[in-house]
Amino acid sequence: MKISKILDLNGEVAPHMKLIRLDNSKARYFALALAICAVVILTSFKTDSMQSIGWLISGFSCCLWAYWGWLDRAKEGYARFIMESFYFSMAFWGFINWY
C-alpha cells in the first residue's frame, strides 16, 4: 500500500483510513460499554482467566478515558487524567496478579 493512500496532503492520516475516531461521542460510549463489561466480568466470574480478561478490558477502557482526560486538561485540569492513570496502573496490577 502506498503511503500517499494512508496520509493526506498535510501529513495526517486520511479520513478513510481512520477506523475509530477517538474524538467523537460514539468512542466514549464504546469505552463506557467496555467499562461496564469489565465490571460485570470482575464481579461475576471467579476463575483466574476471566479475572485477567476483566482487568485487561478495564485497563483498556482506562487508557481511553485517560487519553480524553489529557485532551480535556485545559477545561478540567489534570484530575481526571491522574485518576484514570492511577486506575490503569491498578488494572495492570490486577491483570498481572490474576494471570
Image: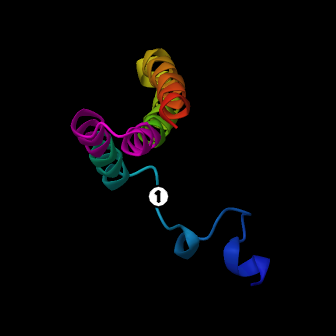
- In the rendered view, how is the structure colored? rainbow
Which residue is rendered at x = 45% and y = 25% of the image?
A: 84
Q: As shown in the figure, which amino acid type bears the numbered disc 1?
A: Arg
Q: Residue furthest right?
A: 3
Q: Residues within 10 Å of mark 1 (few under 14, many from 20)?
A: few
Which residue is rendered at x = 54% and y = 24% of the image?
A: 89
Residue 74 lies in magenta, yes or no? Answer: no
Which residue is rendered at x = 32% and y = 50% of the image?
A: 25
Q: Tell whether 5 sits left or right of 78.
A: right
Q: Quadrant of residue 62?
A: top left
Main secondary structure along the magenta-highlighted residues: helix
Residue 73, percent across and down?
49, 24
Which residue is rendered at x = 53% and y = 76% of the image?
A: 16
Q: Tell whether 98 sits left or right of 14.
A: left
Quadrant in which the N terminus appears:
bottom right
Q: Residue furthest front?
A: 47
Provide the residue span drawn in magenta.
36-58
Residue 65, percent across and down?
43, 35
Q: Tell whether 25 sits left or right of 5.
A: left
Residue 40 lies in magenta, yes or no? Answer: yes
For the residue pair 89 and 76, the one nearer the viewer reads as 89
Q: Relative to 37, is 46 above or below? A: above
Q: Relative to 18, is 28 above or below? A: above
Q: Residue furthest bottom?
A: 1
For the residue pair 59 and 51, the one nearer the viewer reads as 51
Element carrying mark 1: loop
Residue 46, percent across and down?
30, 36
Residue with the mark numbered 1: 21
Q: Relative to 89, is 65 above or below? A: below
Residue 36, percent across and down?
25, 41
Q: Relative to 48, is 33 above or below? A: below
